[in-house]
């Protein structure tokens, strides 16, 4: 069987010999057919907010409106959402100052070209845009999180008299789901707040997993941050494999998000199909721009492959490793055991950048061999204690050799970031 896999802005394909395919795990979101256009779905959600007044009502009398918007690493179709959002705000309150605050979290700054691709020239040229810088922006101390970490918020968000979150909801490998409260934390907070929230203790929690919100310590801190920051309204969408909107949820920061999460859970939930080899991806561009992000796709394979099995991930990684500290952690270590032993001893207030991604990758590498089909350099991949393959054919040959049996089974997850693997 030949199965198409998203890779960068194109596709790879994997060929699984007859009798060896255990299953294909695919989100039903890819088959979901929306009955309305993307714009209509967004307008309908805004017209029928969940447990909230309409956005126009909230905007009346406000002087400083801030829209927190996902950055270039997220495939949020802001070119559809943002014009409609701005239209409703301007209709209700044309005098208000509106600022788009790009939620980079701990990522690099979004470039002008990326802003234009995301929003369109008209918005970039005519709307005030501030790109969050977690290390250098002016910040406001908002007290402590439930975990005891410091909640330090970007002043642009803190000064808003109406704070809005724009984003999308998908399964998230340690926050349970993306969207909602994540606009604030980690989106527009100080790097110190991100580090505290992403500490080793929290990442190591069995509740910090894909699709899990209950008792998730990261989620608990994020909810608190969104409440204290007074996130007044959200518009979150759900997208399919073509990055097209299939559903939109607007309204109260928690209630609208939870309703969206349940919709995603219904579509994304797939039963675990145990196999010797699990093939996965990071859903193509923009989520597979680097190895750092590709760890997300690996966690879907981790949830279905046998103990000691082989994971193959296809990720273009045009930006390379995606984080110098992340790369150095593995490059400077003898192996994943040294990485893990060092991280679990690290107190919350001494968390280092990208430690959480290193912790999850080390967890995976301690249990599985990982082969990357990628545009990243071979030496980079191997320095991080993974195996490099130039294409899927070579990767499958390597994996079969690692398994060492003729009766091997393969599970394929065409889009690893879009599924919740259920035991």
Image (cartoon, rainbow, N blue to C red):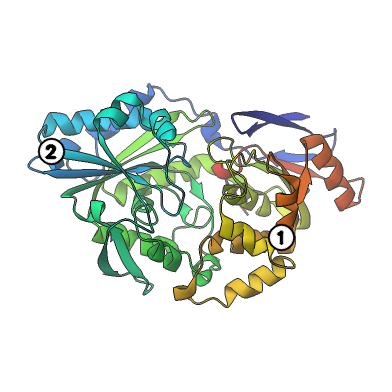
Residue 126, percent from left and from top: 24, 29
Q: Is residue 49 above or below residue 330?
A: above
Q: Is residue 422 above or below residue 331?
A: above
Q: Is residue 9 left or right of residue 133?
A: right
Which residue is disc 2 drawn over? Answer: 96
Q: Secondary structure at mark 1?
A: helix
Answer few, some or many: residues within 10 Å of disc 1's Cα (few below 14, many 20 plus, some between 14 and 19): many
In which quarter of the view is residue 155 placed? bottom left
Residue 405, percent from left and from top: 91, 50
In which quarter of the view is residue 360 placed? bottom right
Q: Residue at x 34, y 25 (%)?
A: 121
Which residue is disc 1 drawn over? Answer: 365
Question: In this view of the protein, which residue sits in the foreground, 260 or 345?
Answer: 345
Q: Secondary structure at mark 2?
A: loop
Distance from disc 1 to disc 2, alpha carbons, whole Å, reads: 51 Å
Answer few, some or many: residues within 10 Å of disc 2's Cα (few below 14, many 20 plus, some between 14 and 19): some
Q: Earlier in the sequence, mark 1 or mark 2?
A: 2
- The furthest residue to the left: 61
Q: Are marks 1 and 2 in contact (CB under 8 Å)?
A: no
Question: In this view of the protein, which residue sits in the foreground, 37 or 28?
Answer: 37
Residue 175, percent from left and from top: 47, 56
Q: Nearer the viewer, mark 1 or mark 2?
A: 2
Q: Residue at x 74, y 68 (%)?
A: 334
Q: Is residue 136 left or right of residue 278?
A: left
Q: Residue at x 37, y 71 (%)?
A: 149
Q: Is residue 318 above or below residue 308?
A: above
Question: In this view of the protein, which residue sits in the foreground, 341 or 329?
Answer: 329
Marking on residue 247: none
Quadrant holding the N terminus? top right
Residue 287, percent from left and from top: 54, 41
Q: Is residue 308 above or below residue 407?
A: below
Q: Is residue 305 left or right of residue 239?
A: right
């Amino acid at each position: 069987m030949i199965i198409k896999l998203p890779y960068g802005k194109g596709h790879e394909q994997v060929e699984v010999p007859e009798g060896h395919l255990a299953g294909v795990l695919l989100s039903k979101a890819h088959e979901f057919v929306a009955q309305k256009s993307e714009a209509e779905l967004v307008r309908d959600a805004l017209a029928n907010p969940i447990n909230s007044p309409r956005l126009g009502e909230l905007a009346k009398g406000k002087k400083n409106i801030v829209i927190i918007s996902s950055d270039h690493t997220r495939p949020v179709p802001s070119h559809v959402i943002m014009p409609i959002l701005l239209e409703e705000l301007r209709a209700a309150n044309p005098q208000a100052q509106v600022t788009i605050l790009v939620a980079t979290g701990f990522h690099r700054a979004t470039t002008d070209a990326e802003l234009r691709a995301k929003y369109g020239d008209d918005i970039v040229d005519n709307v005030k845009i501030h790109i969050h810088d977690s290390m250098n922006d002016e910040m406001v101390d908002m007290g402590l999180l439930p975990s005891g970490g410091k909640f330090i918020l970007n002043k642009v968000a803190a000064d808003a008299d109406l704070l809005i979150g724009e984003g999308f909801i998908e399964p998230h490998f340690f926050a349970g789901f993306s969207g909602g409260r994540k606009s604030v934390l980690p989106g527009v907070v100080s790097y110190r707040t991100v580090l505290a929230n992403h500490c080793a203790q929290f990442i190591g929690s069995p509740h910090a997993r894909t699709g899990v919100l209950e008792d998730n310590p990261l989620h608990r801190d994020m909810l608190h941050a969104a409440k204290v920051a007074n996130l007044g309204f959200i518009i979150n969408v759900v997208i399919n494999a073509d990055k097209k909107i299939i559903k939109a949820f607007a309204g109260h920061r928690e209630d609208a998000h939870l309703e969206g999460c349940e919709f995603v859970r219904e579509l994304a939930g797939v039963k675990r199909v145990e196999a010797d080899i699990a093939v996965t991806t990071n859903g193509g561009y923009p989520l597979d721009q680097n190895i750092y992000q590709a760890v997300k796709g690996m966690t879907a394979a981790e949830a279905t492959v046998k103990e000691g099995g082989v994971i193959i991930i296809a990720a273009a990684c045009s930006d390379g490793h995606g984080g110098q500290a992340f790369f150095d952690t593995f490059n400077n270590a003898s192996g994943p055991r040294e990485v893990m032993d060092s991280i679990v001893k690290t107190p919350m207030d001494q968390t280092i950048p990208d430690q959480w991604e290193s912790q999850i990758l080390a967890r995976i590498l301690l249990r599985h061999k990982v082969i990357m089909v990628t545009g990243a350099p071979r030496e980079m991949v191997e320095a991080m204690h993974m195996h490099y393959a130039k294409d899927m054919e070579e990767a499958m040959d390597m994996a079969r050799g690692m398994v060492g049996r003729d009766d091997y089974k393969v599970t394929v997850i065409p889009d690893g970031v879009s599924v919740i693997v259920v035991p």
